[in-house]
Image (cartoon, helix red, strand yellow):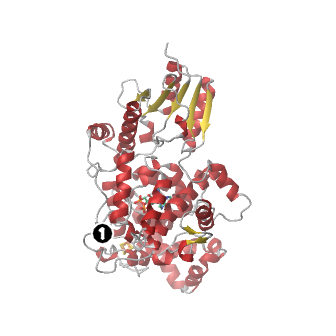
Amino acid sequence: MLRFRNLIVVFGDQLDHQSAAFDGFDPARDLVWMAEVAAEATYVRSHKVRIALFLSAMRHFAAELRAKGYNVEYRKLDAKDNRGDLAGELTAALKKFLPERMVAVEPGEFRVQESLKEVAAHMRVMLEIRGDRHFFCKRDEFAAWAKDRKQLRMEYFYRDMRKRHNVLMDKDEPTGSKWNFDTENRGSFGKAGPASGMKAPHAFGRDEITQAVLELVEARFGHHPGSLQHFSFPVTTAQAEQALSDFVAHRLAKFGEFQDAMWTGETYLYHSRISAALNLKLLNPRRVVAVVESAFREGKAPLAAAEGFVRQVLGWREYVRGIYWMQMPKYLELNALNAREALPDFYWDGKTEMNCLQQTIGQTLEYGYAHHIQRLMVTGLFALLFGVDPVEVHKWYLAVYYDAVEWVELPNTAGMSQFSDGGIMASKPYAATGKYISRMSNYCAGCKFKPEESTGVKACPFTTLYWDFLMRHEEMLGKNQRMALQVKNLGRLGAEKKKEIRAAAKKIRETTAKGGYS
Ligand SMILES: Cc1cc2nc3c(=O)[nH]c(=O)nc-3n(C[C@H](O)[C@H](O)[C@H](O)COP(=O)(O)OP(=O)(O)OC[C@H]3O[C@@H](n4cnc5c(N)ncnc54)[C@H](O)[C@@H]3O)c2cc1C
Ligand code: SF4
């Protein structure tokens, strides 16, 4: 009979050779267990790119472990007896290998953690969950930081992290005597557009493993959203390192200045495209932060760019994880703005006359990628102003992005983008008119609507819905100091204009419900 001491469970987003799961690994007595399960691709209707990226990276990781001499039981999705869900596969493995205990690193997702515990309890197998060394901030450290604070604001968490990990610090002072270079990081491309010679992220070729996965995904999930045409992501740690070097050499220097800008047909601009490699743990955030800080110290990137980037990785990424684990599982149910509308159909095909949405959703379906401002201030903004049920918005974001994992996606969606948590994460809703999109992109130049108009045939739906949003939530927003100016401006609109806006907003909702704007 096959009998092992430890069954080392490695999930698809734990592809880390330095993982605590491998501490004390004994090749003679321990077995690594990994499984591809269809339910992970279907519990939200995942973009083909997202499915393929997970599977390819997992298969490469398992091959690397075997090459190091580890015993690996790897359950392929296309194995005839694959049960299709995690609990079923894990239960079968416990019956087959009869380990004394299961060992795993803290799962990234609450749902997976619960499932792991349930299987262990049901099978009466000891379960050892080890801390996740990938992150700068442990779950309990975040809870200690958050305890007794009236408000959890990223900026203060970030400063604390900078000091604690001595990042961009000169003795006790932040490098450059400022914590934040945000004001220098809001550039747009103006009418001229991005400079020629901008270099897209390095495109990685498809080896045999990746090619087999792409064929499998097409055969099994061909009806899922998106295309595999541009699949060129890093799928191993070595490739992820190369992607990081490529970013630092070619795009970091301009990252800060243009991090909020958008441009038709330019998918990546100066962004890094390393989020999925980080989330699968092919890439370590300490390494990323150190490499970026070195680039600044060596004069290869300005401070505003390096600080802007570090803030995303050391600040936002760690902060959203802390919020996620503090708030789950109730975070999924919050709906502070009582938003109840269905997600418009055009989110799934990009067919809409609103050019900004057509561009952003079209790009999302084609590449599985959109950068932060496209997610927050185009697709997210429209859903917020329209009043879409936050659960539907959450499921969409979790499905369609190459880097989507719930612990990052949910706080960004519920907290930052939809304000459905009522302000746990963000101090105010990210509400704006179409003029914001006009300032930060060239989308409006190619659109039949006019961003400055809130009523009439050329009215930009964003602008109409923005004023309608303020009216619908005036009482609540009026209590928020940071919304004071916006609420004051609402007060300047006459009664007749408000009536017209309400009627126009109602029409947008009705037209959209009937599949309009498409
Ligand atoms: C509604 C919404 C949903 C999102 N869902 C996800 C998700 O599922 N997975 C995900 O990794 N990111 C998510 N983000 C955050 C952000 O949009 C992506 O991390 C970023 O666009 C990834 O592209 P990049 O690697 O080129 O990032 P860059 O712009 O180059 O940024 C560098 C890195 O910083 C980190 N980062 C940047 N912004 C954030 C943020 N707000 N929260 C956490 N980390 C951040 C990422 O690891 C990223 O790779 C979401 C944002 C919004 C508004
Ligand atoms: S005018 Fe409005 S709908 Fe059209 S691209 Fe601009 S913001 Fe989007």
Relative to residue 245, is residue 104 drawn left or right?
right
The answer to whether one can see residue 308 in this image is: yes
Q: Position of residue 7 (x, y in %)?
A: 53, 27
Q: Is residue 131 above or below residue 264?
A: above
Disc 1: CA contacts within 10 A as few (<14), some (14-19) or many (>=20): some
Q: Quadrant of residue 244?
A: bottom left
Is residue 459 visible to us here?
no
Q: Residue at x 61, y 80 (%)?
A: 484
Q: Secondary structure at mark 1?
A: loop
Q: Name the residue located 29 percent from the left edge and 48 percent from the top edge.
A: 228
Q: How many marks?
A: 1
304 and 343: which is toward the camera: 304
Q: Residue 415 in the image: x percent, y percent?
A: 57, 60
Ligand 2 located in image quadrant: bottom left
Q: Is residue 90 above or below residue 429?
A: above
Residue designated by label 1? 264
Give the percent coordinates (x, y) of residue 284: 47, 51
**Nearest the camera: 379 or 7?**
7
Residue 103 pos. (x, y %)? 57, 32
Q: Residue at x 66, y 50 (%)?
A: 140
Q: Is mark 1 within 8 Å of ligand 2?
A: no
> In the image, what residue type sits under mark 1?
Thr
User: Residue placed at 48% from the left, 38% from the top?
Assistant: 11
Compared with 195, 289 (above or below) is above
Horizontally, is 55 left or right of 312 in the view? left
Question: Residue extending furthest right?
Answer: 148
359 or 501, which is in the foreground?
359
In what quadrant of the picture does the C terminus appear? bottom left
Residue 338 sits above or below residue 494 on the image: above
Front position in the image: 136 or 380: 136
